[in-house]
Amino acid sequence: MVTNKLTIVAFIGLLATLATSVAATNFIVGDDYGWTLNFDYQAWAKGKAFVVGDKLVFKYPVGKHNVFKVDGNGFQKCVMPAANQSLASGYDVITLATAGRKWYICGVGKHCETGGMKLVIDVLPQSLPPAPAPRVVPPVVPIGKMFIVGDDCGWTLNFDYQAWAMGKQFHVGDTLVFKYPAGNHNVYKVNGTDFQQCTVPLFGIPLTSGYDVVPLTTPGRKWYICGVGNHCKTGGMKLVIDVLPQTTYPPSPSPWSPYNGARRLGNTRVLGHVV
């Protein structure tokens, strides 16, 4: 139990370290000018966001300047703290480890008082990266096929539409398209009796566009005829089909994992079923 707790603590610490390292920014104080006399460091800092984990880098010729971290009073009066030691490497890297206001000055001669070598910044708390978005399983998408009735021949006289339909599977969500020269034919949806007798329904409204799109919205048997003259009786312009329930794309499988649907029996891994 203790080992597990230590492991969890170590893991959390690692995550925090990684988050800090990923977000960290190195700021060269003064950019190309570095840490030098007669430079406006407050103007340089304006608009920049300093965050815990970022680093300040003070660059200057060794021996000409140094860096002291001071408090607000020491900053205002350019007073070096008695117990503080200066940084003097010429490439002083300061990690911003805590949030809040931070003050820095140069302690050489009057460089702080008259040379403007003083910097104050506000350090913001570390922002952790946003949690990854939950995996979204795509919804089941209907497979919608479009059938051009009669294929290249379209909706026309003296064509065997039952032979055309044979072997095809029509599902809810599919679409029939009746293609013909507008004015030459039409399309009525009828019942079984009207289909057999080639009877136009009394209150039926024909499709007449020449490119009539008929969605198959429910399962079951569907009947269609042409209502022009004797096109149904003698011209064979009649079609009956059976519509099956909707077919769908299955959701994409999750990436394979040795721990997904698997268990071990001795040295044997068994997937997907119980032995």
Image (cartoon, rainbow, N blue to C red):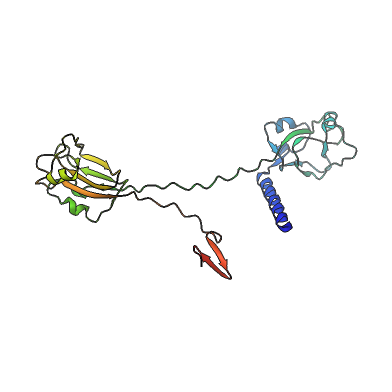
Q: How many numbered badges does the structure rendering display?
A: 0
195 lies above or below 208: below
Query: Residue 38: where, in percent of width, then height?
Result: 77, 31
Q: Is residue 40 visible to us here?
A: no
Quadrant for residue 72, please give it: top right
Query: Residue 121: where, in percent of width, then height?
Result: 74, 34
Residue that sits furthest to the right in the current view: 82
11 lies above or below 93: below
Query: Residue 114: where, in percent of width, then height?
Result: 83, 29
Position of the N terminus by quadrant: bottom right
Q: State the residue at coordinates (21%, 43%).
A: 178
Q: Is residue 26 visible to us here?
A: yes
Quadrant for residue 258, please give it: bottom right
180 lies above or below 274: above
Q: Position of 262 compared to 217: left or right? A: right
Query: Residue 242: where, in percent of width, then height?
Result: 25, 50
Q: Position of 35 compared to 149: left or right? A: right
